[in-house]
């Protein structure tokens, strides 16, 4: 693309907005510099990417040695979690170690398991079992953090747990710990902030978010803006105005290439994703990354332009959004094969090669032909008008597109309607996890070596 996207450089940028008398003045600040390697399977727009990057920079989590991936959606075992805890927190022992019958001498995580037990983060099961290969549920992660960090409940447990639509699914023993971590904004729920999913195995991304938020609660890490942290302030102050002219980073994340005939008047509906959080200089998120921007991609003189008309926030709130993109003017030369009628795509060229492409006749200078099928081909079928070739503007999946507001955008002009939480029955006295095994233990995965978590 010839359009400029300065936020696409190696150092990520956050669009920050300084508040002044109800209006925010735009400026750009660099995101924290991460000293760790990046993970090929954790794109910058992934919901937990900032948490993962920060913990990786601290050496608390690492990738898989064989391919350098993080595998954010994989479950975490109890042994892996014990190892993460050991690296994240430095707590004094509060009890003597015990001999777990299913943790053999020389086991890679034996030291971490012993430390997680003696510092109060983790307990065992009946029969002095630790179950190191068992996938650890989300609720158990939160109980562990509450126990090891000595979180105390300051509000009625059942009242705090009304934040979750599935509060009735929280095990009895876990309710105080979940409530305590909720009060301290340790809980991160993606994609629905109201669903805890307490009994589902925690993923590596979720554990990273929980541990990072626990560090924040201890004053050991800076706040990372995220719309999925339970108990935080609303995404943006009521009535904050983002003025016209503010650049907003977006991305086309569709699965197909989009082609528009360059010399035809065309318009197609298109949805972009907000690429990075738009925040105030106090760290309040005004527009979360991942929000949808709907509008039209249409041809204009010299290329194509995206015209936005609405933004849809992750919580479902829809706001008028008047913005336009920079000029998009990368294009292909496309021809129709006379004998077969197939539509063939030529080499991608930039705006600087426009004069050369305009001089092309027949197939003399066209290379790397590719057969077009599906929607892209259908969009061009009617544009040949009896000829053999046409120039098509191309928008590739993953293209970064900077949007510029053409009118002021007001965030939170009216408070959202109150959420009516589901009432839950009072929980009986909690039972410590060491006193009661889970109702159904998952099958043990294969052993994990130390360098793979």
Image (cartoon, rainbow, N blue to C red):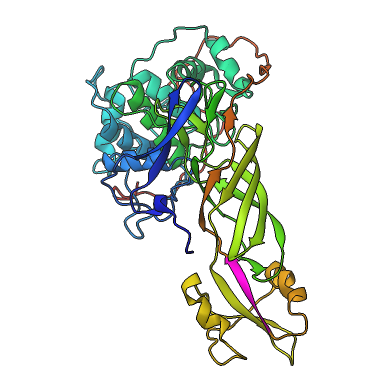
**Count of picture labels:** 0
Q: Nearer the viewer, residue 83 or 96?
A: 83
Residue 441 x/y as whole percent: 52, 36
Q: Nearer the viewer, residue 155 or 292?
A: 292
- Confirm whether the magenta stretch covers residue 113: no
- Confirm whether the magenta stretch covers residue 390: yes
- Point out the residue furthest to the front here: 301
Q: Is residue 276 left or right of residue 98?
A: right
Snapshot quadrant of residue 49: top left
Q: Is residue 135 something one can see in this rendering? A: no
Q: Residue at x 63, y 39 (%)?
A: 321
Residue 409 x/y as whole percent: 58, 33
Q: Nearer the viewer, residue 334 or 253?
A: 334
Residues in magenta? 389-394
Residue 276 x/y as whole percent: 47, 42
Q: Is residue 307 something one can see in this rendering? A: yes
Snapshot quadrant of residue 414: top right
Snapshot quadrant of residue 281: top left
Q: Nearer the viewer, residue 138 or 226?
A: 226
| Predominant SS of the magenta segment | strand
Q: Residue at x 53, y 55 (%)?
A: 326
């Amino acid at each position: 693309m010839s359009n400029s996207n300065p936020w696409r450089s190696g150092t990520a940028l956050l669009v920050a907005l300084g508040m002044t008398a109800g209006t925010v003045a735009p400026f750009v600040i660099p995101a924290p510099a991460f000293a760790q390697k990046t993970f090929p399977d954790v794109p910058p727009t992934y919901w937990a990417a900032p948490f993962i990057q920060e913990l990786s920079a601290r050496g608390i989590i690492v990738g898989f040695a064989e391919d350098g991936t993080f595998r954010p959606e994989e479950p975490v075992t109890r042994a892996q979690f014990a190892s993460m805890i050991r690296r994240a927190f430095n707590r004094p022992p509060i009890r003597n170690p015990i001999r777990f019958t299913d943790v053999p001498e020389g086991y890679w995580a034996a030291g971490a398991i012993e430390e997680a037990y003696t510092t109060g983060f983790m307990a065992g099961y009946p029969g002095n079992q630790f179950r190191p290969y068992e996938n650890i549920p989300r609720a158990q992660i939160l109980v562990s953090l509450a126990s090891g960090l000595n979180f105390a409940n300051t509000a009625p447990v059942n009242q705090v747990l009304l934040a979750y639509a599935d509060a009735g699914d929280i095990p009895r023993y876990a309710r105080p710990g979940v409530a305590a971590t909720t009060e301290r904004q340790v809980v991160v729920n993606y994609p629905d902030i109201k669903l805890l999913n307490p009994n589902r195995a925690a993923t590596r991304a979720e554990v990273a978010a929980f541990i990072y938020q626990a560090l924040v609660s201890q004053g050991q890490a800076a706040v990372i803006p995220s719309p999925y942290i339970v108990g935080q302030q609303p995404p943006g102050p009521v009535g904050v105005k983002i003025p016209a002219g503010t650049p907003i980073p977006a991305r086309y994340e569709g699965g197909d290439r989009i082609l528009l005939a360059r010399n035809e008047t065309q318009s197609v509906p298109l949805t972009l994703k907000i690429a990075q959080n738009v925040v105030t200089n106090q760290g309040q998120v005004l527009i979360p990354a991942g929000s949808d921007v709907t509008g039209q991609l249409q041809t204009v003189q010299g290329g194509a332009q995206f015209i936005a008309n609405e933004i849809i926030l992750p919580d479902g709130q829809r706001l008028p959004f008047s913005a336009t993109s920079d000029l998009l003017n990368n294009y292909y030369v496309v021809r129709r094969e006379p004998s077969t009628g197939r539509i063939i795509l030529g080499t991608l060229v930039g705006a600087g090669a426009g004069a050369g492409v305009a001089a092309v006749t027949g197939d003399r200078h066209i290379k790397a032909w590719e057969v077009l099928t599906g929607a892209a081909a259908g969009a061009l079928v009617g544009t040949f008008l009896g000829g053999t070739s046409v120039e098509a503007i191309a928008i590739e999946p993953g293209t970064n597109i900077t949007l510029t507001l053409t009118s002021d955008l007001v965030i939170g002009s009216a408070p959202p309607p109150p959420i009516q939480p589901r009432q839950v029955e009072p929980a009986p006295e909690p039972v410590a996890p060491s006193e009661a095994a889970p109702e159904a233990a998952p099958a043990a995965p294969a052993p994990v070596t130390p360098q793979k978590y």
